[in-house]
Image: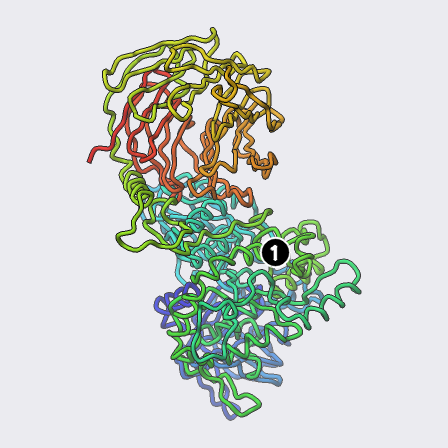
Amino acid sequence: MAFIRKRRQEQQLYSKERFSLLLLNLEEYYFEQHTANHVLKKNGTDRRKVRGSLKICSKSVIFEPDKISRPIIKIPLRDCIKIEAPEDNERNLFTGVTPGTISIISNQAFLTKEQNIIAPFKTERGKTEYVFELDVPGKVEDIIHALHQLYRASHLDKLGDQAAMITAILQSRLARASFDKNRFQNVSETLHMECKAEMVTPLVTNPGHVCITDTNLYFQPLNGYPKPVVQVTLHSVRRIYKRRHGLLPLGLEVFCTENDLCSDIYLKFYDTQDRDDVYFYVATYLENHVAEQAAESYMLQWQRGRISNYQYLLHLNNLADRSCNDLSQYPVFPWIIADYASSELDLTKPETFRDLSKPIGALNKERLERLLERYREMPEPKFMYGSHYSSPGYVLFYLVRVAPEYMLCLQNGKFDHPDRMFNSIAETWKNCLDGATDFKELIPEFYENDSSFLVNNLNLDLGRTQGGKMVENVELPPWASDADDFLQKSRDALESQYVSEHLHEWIDLVFGYKQKGNEAVAAQNVFHPLTYEGGVDLNRIMDPNERVALLTQILEFGQTPKQLFITPHPQRIVPKFKSLSCASSRSIFMTEPPVSPGEESFEDLTEESITLAWNNITKLKPEEQHKIHKGAVTGIAVSSNKSSIFSTSQDSTLKMFSAESKMLQRSVSFSNMALSSCLILPGDTTVICSSWDNNIYFYSIAFGRRQDTLIGHDDAVSKICWHNDCLYSASWDSTVKVWHCVPEELLGTKKHFELVAELEHDVSVNTIHLNDVHTLLASGTKEGTISIWDITTATMLHQLTCHVGTVFDAAFSPDSRHLLSTGEDGYFKVTDVQTGMTISSMASEQPQRCFKWDGNTILSGSQSGELLVWDIVGGKIVERIKGHTGPVTSMWMNEQCNNIITGGEDKQIMFWKQQY
């Protein structure tokens, strides 16, 4: 539980201090502190002194007594009548005033943390004089001058003018100070950059100076609180993200962990260029950093079951600028369970779950009708919901039992009314369904393993409801034996099959294409315009009062996450029947009923052998190699009995090589133009070759001669495929043509070709691939576009810009859910076939010209001549195998996936086998 864990760490570090930045108002700064005595007057002349610390803040003066038995005093500057040094005033009420005394006369002050008990502030009303004696009398003049400045700022009529004056005072203080280089960990560190910034924690920010050296990132608070310097070692950083803070691109969040939601430091800069420069320096010094990752980097991992629903939602929140350090953009999680009345929770029943395709506000039809009626009558800009699903108030509503000081900070020293507190899970859910203005979702803590936010372990006095019941622990549903059991069952529900099948629908609403525009209207998912990114441009608002009012409204109301997807989000692949192994998508997503032992079919054994082969693909070793061409090898085909290997080359020849004798048996040339690919027809009687001379050649193996020529294109034929008497040919003439071939034995003459479909493209087509069930065809062009076609109807399903430059190769996963492509730009891209969304993007050091894959693992031929094994889901290379002396240009793999033949620009064909 990130929020609570962070808070506990702070409490351990600074357990002796009662003062906290949470005692300040929102948008208030803590400037400096001075050791002092609070002088109490008794019976006119009797004086008693309370030792402590006087803290000067931008909107208040706070005195923290050393003894915890005495309360902290907070004096708002707006309530002050007079601030002076009494020794300079002839009308001073005291006699024999000690030098270094400051007198503050105020109409109101707040008392808190008496006996260090967290409770609502007590108010001390009436004209009262507070006298403080400084340990260092010489500082009185400077402090009085600073307080008079801040006093004038707090008494300005307009909030915008107040904020402008306080900002000017802050910037002046920052300009007079600089980072103390004596705080460097090592004297040999090299300074790269220094600038002004604020460290962000929930509800508060702390101004200071950022400094970057060759080994560390430092932040030195202007006030030295909570410690003189915060240090992050650059080599420990694992992730770094640019953030939108206060609606402006000024934030930067740094993590030293891979998966933790809570960062090590969150900084807000005063200038976007400073933020970007710090980002650049930190990212440059990282070896294995994750910087500005796109959502697609996690989507494939989630779809393939590598990460959980919970982990995926955390990643999406992170990428959408949600942070546990910013309560106005706190991570948002969905309500999952809809049954809070049953004694047993049945996760196999759909009615147990909330409808994830609808926002909270649309779950109750009667309420929705009322909201839509108001929406239809509303002038522009229209919105359906007057409150948001995530806001600082909602976050602290859930967390008040572990973060009471945050609630007091947000609500001016008060807890909420007891009847409005988080008293019951079932009541909260019911109110979200029925309440006129309650549309809140949940927070990550509901799906973690720390249940303390549901239990009043701090023994807080949260009041008594109108029914006379004390607010204590949260009331749990009957199916939960205790708070831990409630969280465990909530986690089980989040990871259940139903949620896995429907979570993408909720992602569409919150992070995706139904978040904005016409799709949002159709999905009844329209919130106030100011909550959306780009809903207002603060830089264009010149009036400081309007700017402050607008910013305050947005930050308190809540913000919609940054939109991550503009097309429908793919559904998760959920195994329903049997799962042989996590290693191969062939075995994960079987839809046939399981077979009993002893009924295992040949297909099952084949699947297991394929799984075994891919599990051991890193053990490939070159067995032999033969230089049989005079140009780059462009295609490889092998006879069904594995005795003959056919290869084509840019040298314009088709070669037939004997696997048994290791001898070249035939060399055939059809023209003086390069051949681009080849395949063997079923029955091992005919080899088909495509050529740059616009033709397709049929070669009879039995008769050793050209059998037929198909003159089918107006430019080079780049790739051919065959299935069920149909030939698919791709060409640089911007077409893919589908030919039906009538066998010669039926005609008594040469083969007859009938053009049955022509798939038109805008540019030259470089490669094509059929899926395993021969219903889909993917085509890749010379300009980086990928098209996915339904070949049963000859219609285009998707046209996608995937690469920069030529698409070298493309192939469907065995389950046809995903399409992998590689191009001249050096990227592997995984596309979800159903939605057309790019769900993974992986950069390689150099272009990969050809590959085979099983949906999880890729074997690719690289420009360097190596074979590379990739974990596409994990996004990394797991093995490099030396092979050709130039680029690998062609690859063949047998059905069992344990024999591979490659061809390269080095004019060689290489035979590979797995060696255990």
Residue 287, image x, y percentages: 36, 40
Residue at the location (52% across, 49% down)? 570
Residue 879, image x, y percentages: 29, 35
Amino acid identity at mark 1? Ala
- How many numbered markers are drawn? 1
Q: Is residue 217 above or below residue 870?
A: below
User: Which is nearer the eye, 606 or 910?
Assistant: 606
Residue at the location (71% across, 59% down)? 546
Name the image quarter holding the N terminus: bottom left
Mark 1 closeness class: few <14, some 14–19, many ≥20 residues within 10 Å:
few
Q: Is residue 434 left or right of residue 679?
A: right
Asked if residue 218 can be seen in this view, the reply is no
Residue at the location (38% across, 15% down)? 701
Q: Is residue 167 left or right of residue 865?
A: right
Q: Dot 1: what SS?
A: helix
The residue beneath circle 1 is 168
Rendered image quadrant of residue 104: bottom right
Residue 323, image x, y percentages: 49, 58
User: Which is nearer the eye, 167 or 855?
Assistant: 855
Name the image quarter holding the C terminus: top left
